[in-house]
Image: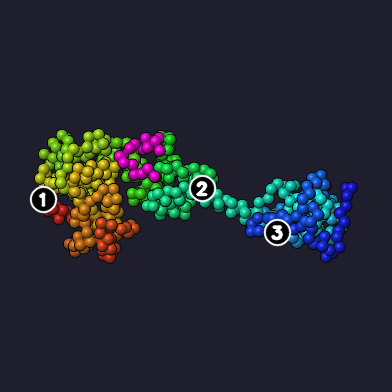
Amino acid sequence: MGWHATAAPRGSRTARAPGRVRRRGAAVELTHGPEHGTEAVDSPRLARLLGTPDLSWLVERARRRLVAGQPLTGSVSLADPTPAQRAAAERLLARAPGGGRSLTVRLEAVDAVLRRSGASPNGLAAAVALLTGPVTSLVQARQEEEDAWKRAHTPLDELVATVPALAEWAARIRADGLARRLGRTPDVTFGLLTGVCTALRELPAVPVVSLPAFAARVLGWAHALDDGTPLATITLSGARALTGFHDGQGAEWRREAWASVGLLRDELSSTVLTLNLRGTPALDRLAEDGEPCVLTLRQLTRKPPAVAAPMVRICENPTVLAAAADMLGPACPPLVCLQGQPSAAALTLLRGLHDHGATLYYHGDFDWGGLRIAGVLRRRIPWRPWRYTAADYRAAVLRSASPPLSPLVSQPTETPWEPGLAAAVAELGVRVEEERELELLLSDLA
């Protein structure tokens, strides 16, 4: 080879400490020896000493240790080496590495040779990186990846700072990995969550607006919130967290979920059932006959009722409204039926009635689902309880002993209009459907 390293005597300063590899956490720090710490690498000499095919096994073992975050100390062995591999190790160390069926090389000895020779003044770790490419330990790589995922979710932190009501939802998005699964990479996920948070800051939309128009204005593309896109999936999840809209699936459920934050797939599918409202020629005629009316969102946004009665009652189930129309006809006071979760049409109508000075009174099912609907409505429209307090619930349970009442299902919820109602429902543990209270409610209307 034209050059031979001379092994230093065992225990000499030159053999022990011409330079060393020091670990700090996951990173590998290269420290220079006193003789060659600032010298440039001698690439041809390094290639002759360590870059031969017969020593590739040694370089690979050293690289594995660096990747694993381990120091380049101790010995590595090769079982059943070829004569060429033994000869290459002997030339590198300028002495026989030992007999036996395996070939054993001490990494400190290799490091010392590389530093003394000038082939790699920074030692074995630097040589491995030069021969095989940059080395990142697994610990460091995992930490860097985790840091990248944390940065990808920072739009959620900024959103929660301005919309604290979404704090629990944001924590759930992080915990269940939904954005991570849909984005797949940190960079894509960051962009995805940036769009989601931009949209959620604008919700609920007041006044109501079509979903494509909202997407075009806020996100720059009318189809950004089309069904099936990652952006739509996460944004709809956040929108439901804002309104407490119930779980479900299917096109109709998604349409109503979007409508709960004022985003409309269309203006005709969102409706609300009413009785004896006035304020348009069509409503006036139906009120004279005491006939129910189904109003679409299109009607309510183009020609809403121009007046409102001083008091408007709201029920959850259409059975109540139908019975009121049958029994009272034109004499029934104005009544609005939600038919479950408040639709965009219902919210638009009730907001208009409230703005015209009407006082709204609400009654619904005494169960967790009914209380949740009432809470959703209260977050959007002010109302007062219509026989919908803790005392009313306890009285309803006593009146409804036969047939037996059904046990509660679903998850508990709060009743901010009267905290004692949720406590009473949890205590008694039975549901009282609105239909069971029909006679009492009709007596109020009469």
- The residue located at (32%, 36%) in the rendering is 266
Which amino acid does the dot numbered 2 rest on? Ala
Residue 318, image x, y percentages: 21, 47
Marks 1/2: CA–CA distance? 59 Å
Q: CA distance from mark 2 to mark 3?
A: 32 Å
Q: Which residues are magenta?
A: 201-218
- Name which of mark 2 and mark 3 comes first in the sequence: 3
The disc labelled 1 sits on which kind of residue? Ala
Q: Which mark is residue 169?
A: none
Q: Which mark is residue 446?
A: 1
Q: Secondary structure at mark 2?
A: helix
Let me know if residue 213 is in the magenta part. yes
Report x, y in % for residue 31.
Answer: 73, 56
Type of amino acid at the residue the image marks with label 3: Arg
* Left-right relation of 250 to 422: right
Q: Is residue 226 above or below residue 446?
A: above
Residue at the spot of label 2: 152
Q: Secondary structure at mark 3?
A: strand
